[in-house]
Amino acid sequence: MKTPFGGIDHLGIAVHDLAAATETYRDVLGFAILGEETLPERGLKVQFVDTGDARIELLGATNDNSEISGFLKKRGEGIHHICVRVRDIDGAVATMKERGAHVIGDGVQSGAHGTRVAFVHPKTTHGVLLELVEHTPDNADANTKEDSK
């Protein structure tokens, strides 16, 4: 079966204190910290961490109604999602729907650093929230430059 997916882009980890989590990944683990961004429409502040082969996206809520607030209240800190890279997100979403996946919300939306993202309901993927991400030539290197912190 042909797949529109290109591999794991990052793991999303929901945290209560983004600054403290960033310090842990930088100072304790020694990973390079990449660009931070606030996504007000989604109630998120995100910090990317370069682990070498893949990235971690630390997710902090900016309000009580953010995309991760319910997750944090119910489950606490931890792995929130796995993100898979796609070249054509519209095509990937259509393919997933044709194959029986339930795409959350309105489908494709704006992500960090100018990406386009969509989320697949965990009931479709055996309990794991799956994010699809499409990088464009304009944002392909947005998360590869070390922050000067």
Image (cartoon, helix red, strand yellow):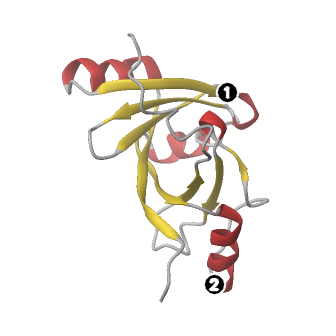
Location of residue 118 (image quadrant): bottom right
Q: Residue farthest to the front? A: 137
Q: Nearer the viewer, residue 78 or 48?
A: 48
Task: Pinpoint residue 9: horizontal percent, then vertical percent.
Answer: 43, 51
Q: Is residue 15 left or right of residue 32?
A: right
Q: Is residue 11 left or right of residue 23?
A: right
The residue at the far right in this view is 106
**Distance CA(mark 1)–CA(mark 2):** 33 Å
In this image, 52 relative to 33: left or right? left
Q: Nearer the viewer, residue 144 or 84?
A: 144
Hey, which residue is sitting farthest bottom in the picture?
1
Judge by depth and name the residue closer to the eye, 126 or 5. Answer: 5
- Mark 2 Cα shell of 10 Å, populated few (<14), some (14-19), many (≥20): few
The answer to whether residue 44 is above or below residue 103 is above
Q: Residues within 10 Å of mark 1 (few under 14, many from 20)?
A: some
The residue wearing badge 2 is 100
Numbered-mark total: 2
- Determine the image quadrant of residue 119: bottom right
Q: Is residue 77 visible?
A: no
Which residue is at a point 76% across and 34% down the rendered structure image? 41
The residue tagged 1 is 63
Q: On the rendered image, what quadrant is the C terminus found in?
A: top left
Amino acid under disc 1: Asn
Q: Percent position (x, y) of residue 109?
A: 73, 50
Residue 84 to residue 65: above or below = below
